[in-house]
Amino acid sequence: MGRQFTAEEEKDLTLPADSIHRARLQDIKERPFEFTDKASGEKKTASNLEWWWEITRPGAGLDEDYIGRRVKGECRPKLTNRPGNKFREWSEAVLDREIPVGMVVDLDDLIGLEAEIVIGHRVDKKDPTKVWEEVIGVLPAGDAVAPPF
């Protein structure tokens, strides 16, 4: 007889789209990927920063079962002063301060800090029946622990 498993009931802990939750930044990892340049047809490489968050205080009327849920958001690894630059906007929210041109941000200084994260849902490009949760925005926590500098 092979390995056997019994079906168990499990609570759906999907975070609602457009909901806001207090979360602690657990890790930021650079993830390289390959793509094909549509204009030239050549293969190229690039990378994204994956921001991994852990829910510490669920919002949207959700209960304590959501504490500890992990969710990620991604941005380009380029810190600029242009509007819409997620890296700068998210860093400013976590640090609760503006980042002027010339300021250096060390990713290690962001880890462990809290912010309010906004959840979005993204439909999988290859399988439209799958929907992925992702962080689409980060707001200052207000009463979070002060940044290290």
Image: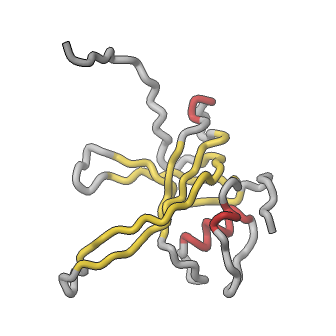
Which part of the image, by quadrant, shows the C terminus?
A: bottom right
Residue 137 falls in which quadrant of the image? bottom right
Image side of residue 112 versus residue 130, left or right: right
Residue at x 67% of width, y 74% of height: 105
Asked if 100 appears above or below 121 in the picture, the reply is below
Image side of residue 136 versus residue 123, left or right: right
Image side of residue 130 versus residue 86, left or right: left
Q: Where is residue 54 shown, x and y percent of the image?
A: 59, 45
Image side of residue 56 versus residue 131, left or right: right
Considering every residue shown, the one lying at the far front of the view is: 1
Q: Where is residue 116 shown, x and y percent of the image?
A: 65, 53
Q: Where is residue 124 shown, x and y percent of the image?
A: 30, 52
Residue at x 21% of width, y 17% of height: 2
Which part of the image, by quadrant, shows the N terminus?
A: top left
Counting every numbered tag in the picture gives: 0
Asked if 41 appears above or below 126 in the picture, the reply is below
Asked if 89 appears above or below 145 in the picture, the reply is below
Rendering colour mode: secondary structure
Is residue 136 or residue 31 the one in the foreground? 31
Residue at x 66% of width, y 41% of height: 56
Residue at x 61% of width, y 66% of height: 90
Q: Where is residue 16 shown, x and y percent of the image?
A: 49, 42
Considering every residue shown, the one lying at the far top of the view is: 1
